Amino acid sequence: GAVVSQHPSWVICKSGTSVKIECRSLDFQATTMFWYRQFPKQSLMLMATSNEGSKATYEQGVEKDKFLINHASLTLSTLTVTSAHPEDSSFYICSASYGTAMNTEAFFGQGTRLTVV
Amino acid sequence: TQLLEQSPQFLSIQEGENLTVYCNSSSVFSSLQWYRQEPGEGPVLLVTVVTGGEVKKLKRLTFQFGDARKDSSLHITAAQPGDTGLYLCAGFSGNTGKLIFGQGTTLQVKP
């Protein structure tokens, strides 16, 4: 299957600082990338959907000024958590998809464990 | 809004037992995906079902897509401790292209 690389795998930052997470599709061009947040033993909650070259579409309740998403190319999307606080600590996962609407598949990065202290 | 209801959410069984996980929706999906996730890692795609009534097998795992493409099931035969993990169903929502997930099923297989 297609490979999606997410970096870093884990990060610890101080409260009030910003953290950038990268998501790269290594062997295919991703028309769409998704960003999820996952709490322990829970499912993935979609935060936003981004298409290359256009603004991300955020889910209801997700602060777009706090979670900045940039999808500058077909192989790279970034999520920046601005002015991070301890409640932002979570597991963040990206996925990338390609293909037609009928047979689109999504492939996931390995996730980033963010801890804000 | 299309939703996926997954059940059960938790399952603890003995090695060798069979189990079925269900993924239901009131909406039609063009396809549904099943993923397995280990702690601290991203989900790994197991299978995609596309055609109503389709059955796919992956070793001891059998996946079925409902005739109306509103539901799917995952059946594991003779479960093994290595099957332990979080199983997730997901589907692309209508014209938005969003990939949404069910609540997940945490499976524990005891030796």
Image: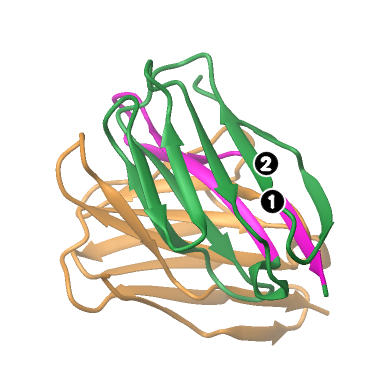
Q: Note whether residue A26 is visible.
A: yes
Looking at the rendered structure, the secondary structure element under dot 1 is loop
The quarter holding residue B64 reads top left
User: What mark, if any, has residue B103 been given in the picture?
Assistant: 2
Identify the mark nearer the N-term, 2 or 1: 1
Residue under label 1, please give it: B18
Q: Colour of chain A?
A: orange
Q: Is residue B47 left or right of residue B1?
A: left
Residue B102 location, x and y as percent?
60, 39
Subunit under mark 1: B
Q: Is residue A78 left or right of residue B88?
A: left
Residue A18 location, x and y as percent?
60, 74
> For the point 18% across and 76% down, which residue is it?
A27
Span highlighted in magenta in the image: B85-110
Amino acid marked by disc 2? Gln
Q: Is residue A115 left or right of residue A55?
A: right
Residue under disc 2 on the same chain as residue under disc 1: yes
Q: Is residue B36 above or below residue A25?
A: above
The quarter holding residue B58 reads bottom left
Gap in angstroms between the C-alphas marked 2 and 1: 21 Å
Subunit under mark 2: B
Q: Note whether residue B4 is visible.
A: no
Amino acid marked by disc 1? Asn
> For the point 67% across and 41% down, which residue is it?
B103
Q: Colour of chain B?
A: green
Q: Of residues A44 and A11, which is closer to you in this image?
A: A44
Asked if the magenta segment contains residue B98, the reply would be yes
